[in-house]
Image: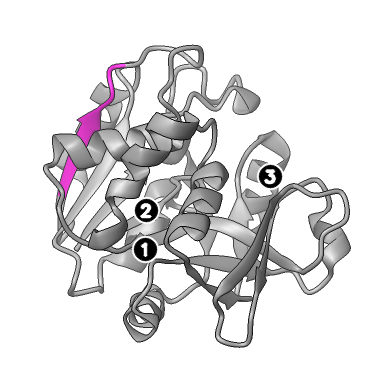
Amino acid sequence: MKVILPVAGYATRLYPLTENFPKALLKIGNKPMLEHILDKLNPIKEIDEIFVVTNNKFYTQFSKWANEYKSEKIITVVNDGTMSNEDRLGAVGDVNFAIDKGNIDGDVIVIAGDNLFGLDMQKFVNFSKEKDSSVFAAYDLKNPSLLAKKFGTVEVDDNCKVIGFEEKPEHPKTALAATMIYLILQRDLYQINNCLQEKNPDNWGEFARYLIEKSGMHCLPFDEYWYDIGGLEQYKEVQDKF
């Protein structure tokens, strides 16, 4: 099993912190944001390689970090060749780029590099096996109004199969916020390229809806903690918490 961590964004909402420094390497507590995610992944025996997809602007910084970071897994830093927010590939494009460059042909975990979460990733992997399905995780905010216009929202049936997915609705139907924590089965990998060809999506949520429609997915709710670090306000909040 491989992991793809797309961290090729330019994080303009975090300027000036990220004007010349990658968001995923900003420190949360005593270590870079990215290492909090890797702490969740390192114990999982099924994983043998982790691909960190960055851009040409920050490639040297991620390569230096990878050379210094001690991991039991192989870490491969991939350069998507972009230099600015204007020519970025986007999350779906970067995941597809890593699959192509790494000749990946198996199950893949995809996690956005700015997600901090309390979900047990072994439980997540086991959930996918149990459902025999590509899966993603959703954070239970308990109150649907807290999601309004902020997050993608997820509806599931009694078997945790996804029956609805809305991107930042004004009136959310559920309290489940979609996170970019995914496990895509080998049999569904080709749908990433199909989605790019058919939809040219701007964000990962569009691919999620595509895969739900084409192949079906299951969703694992969790409520430990989850932070989506988009701007300076969220970054300060997470710094205070950690």
Label placed on residue 183 = 1
**Where is 17 relative to 48, above or below?**
above
Nearer the observer, 22 or 164: 164
Number of labelled discs? 3
Q: Image point 61% across, 55% down: which residue?
A: 227
Decide if residue 88 is on the left or right side of residue 125.
Answer: right
Q: Image point 15% across, 39% down: which residue?
A: 67
**Where is 42 relative to 58, above or below?**
below
Q: Image point 29% across, 27% down: which residue?
A: 61
The residue stretch that appears in magenta: 75-81
Between circles 2 and 3, the one closer to the viewer is 2
- Tell me the element at label 3: helix
Amino acid under disc 2: Val
Labelled pair 1, 2 in contact (Cβ < 8 Å): yes
Q: Answer yes or no: is residue 104 visible.
A: yes
Decide if residue 175 is on the left or right side of residue 78.
Answer: right
**Mark-to-mark CA distance, 1 and 2:** 6 Å
Predominant secondary structure, magenta span: strand
Decide if residue 27 is on the left or right side of residue 82.
Answer: right
**Mark-to-mark CA distance, 1 and 3:** 26 Å
In the rendered image, which quarter contains the C terminus?
bottom right
Residue 50, horizontal then vertical, whole percent = 22, 52
Residue ID for mark 3:
234
Decide if residue 30 is on the left or right side of residue 203.
Answer: left
Residue 224, horizontal then vertical, whole percent = 60, 75
Labelled pair 1, 3 in contact (Cβ < 8 Å): no
At label 1, counting other C-alpha atoms closer than 10 Å, the crowd grade (few under 14, some 14-19, many 20 or more) is many
**Where is 141 relative to 2, above or below?**
below
Amino acid under disc 3: Gln
N-terminal-most mark, 1 or 2: 2
Residue 70: within the magenta?
no
Label placed on residue 110 = 2
